[in-house]
Image (spheres, rainbow, N blue to C red):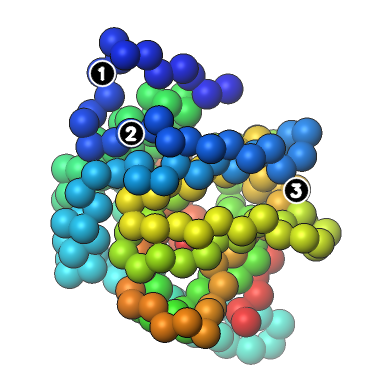
């Protein structure tokens, strides 16, 4: 249940939930889009692009060793992330969604050819319900979510500073992705917040590399 923000609450000035639009995906799953959630996202983007501990990761899929079509950096202990703004926004998210966000992983989509395939996050394997916030920085991309059994997807166009939050049973009953696209795009970074021990740089439920 989302806590109502009232005027007397002490939210940091950098974030603004007032534009939040929640889409009920089904009876037990939802996704929320908060356009323009973070003010000053450009400076955080530049900082992360230059300083995050980026890695190229690989995975075995069937019998093939595949290069992930993106770079990843991880702060399993959020306290160690050098950007004070990340600590501030994690606290704001914890206050809003009543989840103690203590770790994060970050994706870098270098161009429009980078992507994340359909998957559910690790937390969906551990918890029936979860609330997973994802902050977008840099280039505008599409974020899709569809039922686990396939079917029509819901598409969000996410711009730098936007927040997308997946809630309820959405990590169990739904799959999400950031597809490749033909329209050229520069780098985008997504910052994914998780409770302690749930940092999930690798989609583990199902992964498709397009
Ligand atoms: O980049 C995004 O917006 C989503 C990232 C994601 O789904 C993931 O890393 O598990």
Q: CA distance from mark 1 to mark 2?
A: 12 Å
Q: Residues within 10 Å of mark 3 (few under 14, many from 20)?
A: some
Quarter of the picture holding the C terminus: bottom right
Left or right, 179 with respect to 113, comes to: right
Residue 4 x/y as whole percent: 46, 17
CB under 8 Å between discs 3 and 1: no
Residue position for label 3: 173
Question: Could you tell me which residue is drawn at 31 percent across and 64 percent down?
Answer: 138
Residue 190 x/y as whole percent: 39, 59
- Above-or-below relation of 207 to 120: below
Q: Is residue 204 visible?
A: no
Question: Could you tell me which residue is drawn at 51 percent across and 74 percent down?
Answer: 115
Q: Residues within 10 Å of mark 2 (few under 14, many from 20)?
A: some
Please tell me whether mark 3 sits on a helix, a strand or a loop.
Answer: helix
Q: Which residue is nearer to you in this view: 65 or 203?
A: 203
- Label annotation for residue 168: none
- Marks 1 and 2, the one that precedes in the sequence: 1
- Nearest-to-viewer mark from 1 and 2: 2
- Marks 3 and 1, the one that precedes in the sequence: 1
Residue position for label 2: 16
Question: Could you tell me which residue is drawn at 47 percent across and 82 percent down?
Answer: 183
- Above-or-below relation of 111 to 124: below
CB under 8 Å between discs 2 and 3: no
- Nearest-to-viewer mark from 3 and 1: 1
Residue position for label 1: 10
Ligand 1: does it lie within 8 Å of the C-beta at label 3?
no
Q: CA distance from mark 3 to mark 1?
A: 34 Å
């Amino acid at each position: 249940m989302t806590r109502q923000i009232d005027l007397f609450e002490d939210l940091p000035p950098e974030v603004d939930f007032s534009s939040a639009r929640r889409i009920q995906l089904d009876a037990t799953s939802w996704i929320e889009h908060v356009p323009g959630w973070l003010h000053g996202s450009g400076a955080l983007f530049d900082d992360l692009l230059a300083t995050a501990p980026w890695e190229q990761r690989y995975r075995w899929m069937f019998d093939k060793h595949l290069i992930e079509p993106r770079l990843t950096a991880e702060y399993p202990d959020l306290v160690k992330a050098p950007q004070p703004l990340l600590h501030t926004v994690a606290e704001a998210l914890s206050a809003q969604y009543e989840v103690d966000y203590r770790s994060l992983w970050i994706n870098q989509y270098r161009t429009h050819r980078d992507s994340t395939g359909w998957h559910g996050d690790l937390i969906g394997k551990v918890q029936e319900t979860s609330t997973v916030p994802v902050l977008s920085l840099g280039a505008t991309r599409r974020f899709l979510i569809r039922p686990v059994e396939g079917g029509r997807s819901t598409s969000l166009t996410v711009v730098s500073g936007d927040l997308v939050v997946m809630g309820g049973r959405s990590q169990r009953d739904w799959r999400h992705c950031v597809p490749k696209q033909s329209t050229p795009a520069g780098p985008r970074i997504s910052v994914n917040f998780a409770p302690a021990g749930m940092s999930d740089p690798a989609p583990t439920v199902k992964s498709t590399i397009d």
